[in-house]
Image: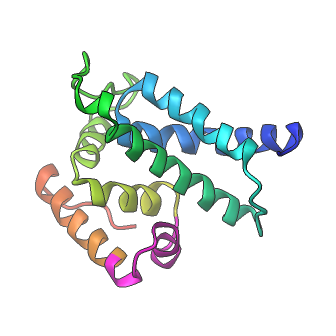
């Protein structure tokens, strides 16, 4: 079990990232908060010894993605319909950002994680490959395909990073 200080440091450092990843997958604030608590509970109870901060961050990303997927495929979730079918979007985003957010959220599931990790968390393709357990060339292919999809949806050029 981890010390209170290390848990508080991890929460302070990674809470925003965990919440964004959850919202990307779940599109629901209540489920996001549930998974957020689950991820940090697993962190507290985990006996994994991290090599460095990048290893810790990658572990938290993997646990978050897995927890989101588990929730989405749970029996309860598959037998119910959410009251809010459409993702809540922050009102303070300019219209252009809302449109980009909608386009990213509408990407096929296998593209969302790669796009998020590459553009929002600024991981390189080799790092994303290690985190997601995929070949680097697969990551590049997913990035290229997702850019094309986003370009088509947004009706123009997508900014290159």
Q: Is residue 155 visible?
A: no
**Is 45 positioned to the left or the right of 101 in the image?**
right
The residue shown at (39%, 81%) is 135
**Is 142 positioned to the left or the right of 64 in the image?**
left
* Residue 2 drawn at (x, y percent): 83, 45
Span of residues in magenta = 123-138
* Residue 76 drawn at (x, y percent): 32, 27
> What is the total number of numbered labels drawn onto the structure image?
0
Q: Is residue 149 above or below residue 7?
A: below
The residue shown at (16%, 60%) is 149
Q: For the stretch drawn in magenta, what is the main secondary structure?
A: helix
Frontmost residue, 26 versus 143: 26
Assign the C terminus to one quadrant of the image: bottom left
* Residue 10 drawn at (x, y percent): 74, 45
**Is 43 positioned to the left or the right of 19 in the image?**
right
The residue shown at (28%, 44%) is 105
Q: Is residue 75 above or below residue 125?
A: above
| Image quadrant where residue 90 sits | top left
Residue positioned most to the top: 83
Would you say residue 129 sits in the magenta stretch? Answer: yes
Q: Is residue 113 visible?
A: yes
Would you say residue 88 sits in the magenta stretch? Answer: no
Q: Is residue 37 above or below residue 18?
A: above
* Residue 144 drawn at (x, y percent): 25, 72
Q: How is the image coloured?
A: rainbow
| Image quadrant where residue 9 sits | top right
Frontmost residue, 94 versus 73: 73
The residue shown at (58%, 36%) is 38
């Amino acid at each position: 079990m981890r010390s209170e200080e290390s848990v508080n440091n991890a929460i302070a450092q990674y809470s925003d990232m965990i919440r964004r990843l959850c919202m990307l997958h779940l599109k629901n604030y209540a489920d996001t908060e549930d998974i957020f608590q689950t991820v940090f509970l697993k962190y507290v109870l985990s006996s994994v010894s991290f090599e460095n901060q990048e290893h810790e961050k990658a572990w938290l990303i993997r646990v978050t993605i897995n927890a989101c997927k588990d929730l989405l495929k749970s029996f309860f979730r598959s037998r119910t319909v959410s009251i809010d079918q459409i993702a809540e979007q922050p009102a303070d985003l300019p219209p252009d950002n809302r449109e980009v957010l909608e386009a990213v959220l509408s990407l096929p599931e296998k593209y969302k994680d790669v796009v998020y990790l590459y553009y929002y968390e600024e991981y390189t393709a080799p790092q994303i490959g290690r985190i997601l357990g995929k070949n680097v060339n697969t990551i590049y292919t997913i990035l290229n395909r997702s850019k094309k999809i986003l370009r088509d949806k947004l009706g123009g050029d997508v900014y290159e990073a």
